[in-house]
Image (spheres, helix red, strand yellow):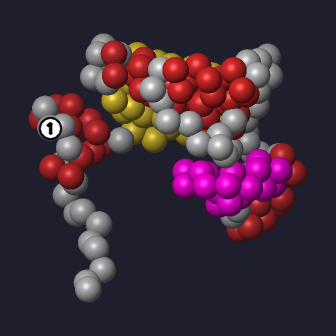
Amino acid sequence: MGMPLAEARAKARGLGVEVRSAWGVGRIVSEVFEAFAEPNFWEPTVVMDYPKEISPLARDHRRLPGVVERFEVICAGREMANAFSELNDPLEQRRRFEAQVEAREQGDEEAHPLDEDFLLALEYGMPPTGGMGLGVDRLVMLLTGEESIREVILFPALRPEG
């Protein structure tokens, strides 16, 4: 993410993308991508190498600085699956969680909270791992032609009474 922050903010705003003060270049690039590119991927498409800033649990890319080993499968303009190599260095994970806490304090609601239990598990030792999350609800949306996720969730979250 070699673009200066001020330039990224200006370009995103020029495209009509809302930019919050807590966002860095990686988050801004992600928001522009989601607004302009993602809706145009109709055929199943694998998008690789995401900004480190928006991927606090993923391992650093082996060759590209500022990027992590992560991919998403996008189909019909929607993210269907998300996958990445898990970060298993407890010191680096703590630094990333602390950066996420700072971003949350500056107003980034999507920033990841600090998870001491997860950090303790990493300190005990976690082998190299990876995983993929497939959004079954999004897959059902695709298969049924539904536009709203609320229409396909079998057990929607209940709102508190009163």
In front of the other: 31 or 112: 31
Q: Say if residue 129 shows up in the picture.
A: no
Tell whether 119 sits left or right of 44. Answer: right
Residue 11 part of the magenta-drawn span: no
Question: Dot 1: within a 10 Å radius of its alpha carbon, few (fewer than 14), some, or many (20 or more) residues?
Answer: few
At 77% from the left edge and 18% from the top edge, which residue is drawn? Answer: 2
Q: Position of residue 128 (x, y in %)?
A: 73, 39
Examine the image and state in which quarter residue 87 appears. top right
Q: Is residue 104 above or below residue 33?
A: below
Toward the viewer: 12 or 89? 12
Q: Which is the main secondary structure of the residues drawn in magenta? A: helix
Q: Secondary structure at mark 1?
A: loop
* Nearer to us in this view, 105 or 156: 105
Q: Can residue 32 be seen by looking at this rendering?
A: yes
Q: Which residue is mark 1?
A: 146
**Residue found at x 15% / y 49%:** 151
Which quarter of the rendered picture does the N terminus lie within? Answer: top right
Q: Residue 114, image x and y in percent?
A: 70, 62
- In the rendered image, the residue lying farthest to the bottom is 162
Residue at image point 39% right, 31% down? 79
Q: On the image, which quarter does residue 154 sit in?
A: bottom left
Looking at the rendered image, the quarter that the C terminus falls into is bottom left
Q: In the image shown, does 51 or 143 lie closer to the viewer?
A: 51
- Residue 15 image position (x, y, % from top left): 47, 20
Which quadrant of the figure has residue 105? bottom right
Q: Is residue 136 left or right of residue 123?
A: left
Query: At x 59% / y 42%, what residue is drawn?
Result: 20
Please report the bounds of the magenta region as a residue range.
94-113
Q: Does the stretch in magenta take in 112?
A: yes
- Amino acid residing under circle 1: Glu
